[in-house]
Amino acid sequence: MASTDEEVRRAFWAPGFNKVHFIIGLIISTIATYLVGTNFLSYWWFQARLIANLLDMANVQYHLFDLGRARPLFQIFPLRYTAGGPTFELPIPYEKPDPSTVVFILLNLILASFVIWKLRKIPFPFKILWFIITPMMAATLIYNAFWSIPTRLTWITVDWTCSGVLMFILISVAFSIGVFGLRGPLRIKLFWLAFTMLFSVGWNILRLAFTIASLYHLGTFVFVLVHYLAGTFLDFLYLIAFAGIAIGQLTNYALEDRY
């Protein structure tokens, strides 16, 4: 009887699994992680300047300044995170999220987690991605609800928790595991990986601008729903959508080769 290690190895390197493309995907993930971890501040300021233009169009009063104290990704784990980087100061009081709103959002995230886990059509690597995104967002929400301090002004910092830059790492890892290992042309895998990352750049700029504008014009309740609930779902949905298209195209190629 084969050992567990042998069974896992056979299943992992099964016929049809593209080992070369999978390794390429892992290399891309490693490079993406390194670039994100070392060039984060310039990217945050790129985002902040574009967000500022959108806020001007939305008639939002703000003051953009450098909060400083930004730490590289490799220095903030496990528990050394402090806000730092380009910061939007809004002339409205900062209020803690209402406990009932927090409970509502957490219950929705728990329910969504149960549904996503049960859906067989969602590839396993992307399910894992959801269970990475959701606890991070939930932890930030709980911290702001119970430990943040109300102030006369509101600061929103474009940093590790708000910029969406960590999605680059999650996207590259999810694609390397869930897409690059499949049979099919490498160009399809690279195209949809690049397209998803470019979409993530644009989406996160629009998301942050809309979130800040909703806080300024509509208040904390709408801001919390948009940022913690809608943002989490949409981050996951666009990744699943683009990865699903890539997998569908690769499946068509596999069927053509078979027949």
Image: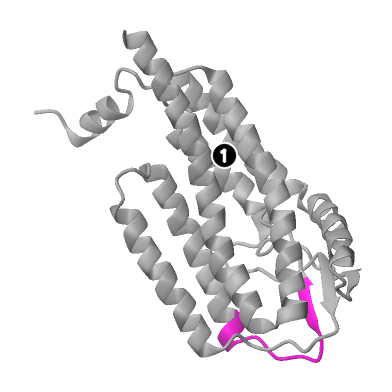
Residue 46 relative to residue 243: left or right: right
Coordinates of residue 110 in the picture (x, y in percent)? 38, 69
Q: Is residue 96 above or below residue 176?
A: below
Which of 128/237 is in front?
Answer: 237
Rendered location of residue 46, percent (x, y): 84, 52
Q: What is the x, y in percent for residue 60?
A: 85, 73
Identify the residue shown where x is 76% and y is 79%.
217
Residue drawn at (51%, 51%), measured in percent from left and top?
A: 237
Of 86 and 253, nearer the camera is: 253
**Is 42 a magenta residue?**
no
List x then y, in percent, for residue 144.
Answer: 61, 81
Q: Quadrant of residue 218?
A: bottom right
**Image quarter hosting the C terminus:** top left
Magenta stretch bounds:
144-156
Snapshot quadrant of residue 51: bottom right
Q: Relative to 46, is 159 above or below?
A: below
Q: Check the picture and name the quadrant holding the N terminus.
A: top left
Which residue in the structure is indicated by mark 1?
172
Total numbered labels: 1
Q: Is residue 145 magenta?
A: yes
Identified by mark 1, the residue type is: Ser
Mark 1 element type:
helix
